[in-house]
């Protein structure tokens, strides 16, 4: 057990080199082995004998911020065959083949909370009705199911009442080809006519902007 004691600490350089490593004082006093922490950049494992980082398909030299051998996939991994990434603060290369940007991921709950914020609904508020849209013929005719053959309409619909008693809807479209990080997005919808009697099941909702750019889609990737 750690018992609140620091077992290992170190200072990472800009290119993944670790310095100022400290061992746990408790283990040293007791004459017990200290913890070896070999994890470095994403996908890298430090080799104490060579000072290099094992990166699955090749070795990485943290002292110079480059790989020690050419990229196994050649120019498909980029023009610089030895480069780790354009900027290690915003890119990773977990396999040692091709770098990719780090995404500020948003999960489903975060996206739904953002949509509820946009609709003016407290995050803790429960929906008053819920239905799904899809192309399952076996569920066609169910009260909580709307049949459609248009994948762009597929998803989950949650209807709420805001503080003014207006109907609003939070929509999760589960098949969005424009989503670059996943398959789905949320958005908030409002009534186009009377907000007290609007039927979101049969009528299209009016979109509510979710950011300063006017976009209403709130994407998530997991």
Image (cartoon, rainbow, N blue to C red):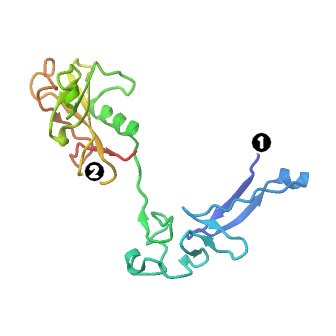
SS assignment at label 2: loop
The picture quadrant where one finds residue 52 is bottom right
Give the Cα separation between the discs numbered 1 and 2: 44 Å
Above or below: residue 76 compared with residue 166? below
Q: Quarter holding the N terminus?
A: top right
Instruction: State the image coordinates of residue 111 (x, y, percent, origin top left).
Output: 35, 39
Instruction: State the image coordinates of residue 175 (x, y, percent, origin top left).
Output: 25, 44
Q: Which mark is residue 179?
A: 2
Q: Quarter holding the C terminus?
A: top left
Q: Is residue 127 left or right of residue 12?
A: left
Instruction: State the image coordinates of residue 178 (x, y, percent, origin top left).
Output: 23, 52
**At 40% from the left edge and 42% from the top edge, which residue is drawn?**
107
**At 55% from the left edge and 62% from the top edge, which residue is drawn?**
43
Asked whether residue 192 appears in the rendered view, the answer is yes
Q: Is residue 126 left or right of residue 167?
A: right
**At 38% from the left edge and 28% from the top edge, which residue is drawn?**
123
Instruction: State the image coordinates of residue 165 (x, y, percent, origin top left).
Output: 22, 17
> In the image shown, does 105 or 148 lie closer to the viewer?
148
> In the image shown, does 210 or 3 lie closer to the viewer?
3
The picture quadrant where one finds residue 16 is bottom right
Say how many tags the image has. 2
Above or below: residue 140 compared with residue 102? above
Asked whether residue 162 appears in the rendered view, the answer is no
Q: Residues within 10 Å of mark 2 (few under 14, many from 20)?
A: some
Q: Is residue 103 left or right of residue 171?
A: right
Name the residue carrying label 1. 1
């Amino acid at each position: 057990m750690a018992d609140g004691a620091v077992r290992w600490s170190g200072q990472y350089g800009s290119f993944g080199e670790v310095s100022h490593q400290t061992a746990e004082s408790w283990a040293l006093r007791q004459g017990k082995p200290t913890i070896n922490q070999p994890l470095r950049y994403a996908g890298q494992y430090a080799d104490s004998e060579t000072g290099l980082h094992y990166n699955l398909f090749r070795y990485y030299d943290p002292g110079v911020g480059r790989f020690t051998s050419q990229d196994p996939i050649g120019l498909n991994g980029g023009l610089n065959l030895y480069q780790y990434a354009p900027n290690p603060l915003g890119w990773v290369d977990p396999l040692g083949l091709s770098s990719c940007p780090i995404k500020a991921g948003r999960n489903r709950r975060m996206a739904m909370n953002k949509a509820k914020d946009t609709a003016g609904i407290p995050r803790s508020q429960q929906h008053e009705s819920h239905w799904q849209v899809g192309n399952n013929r076996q569920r066609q005719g169910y009260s909580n199911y709307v049949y459609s053959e248009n994948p762009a309409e597929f998803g989950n619909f949650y209807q709420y009442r805001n503080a003014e008693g207006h109907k609003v809807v939070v929509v999760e479209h589960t098949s969005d080809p424009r989503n670059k990080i996943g398959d789905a997005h949320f958005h908030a919808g409002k009534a186009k006519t009377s907000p007290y009697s609007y039927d979101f099941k049969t009528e299209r909702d009016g979109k509510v902007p979710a950011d300063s750019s006017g976009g209403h889609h709130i994407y998530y990737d997991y």
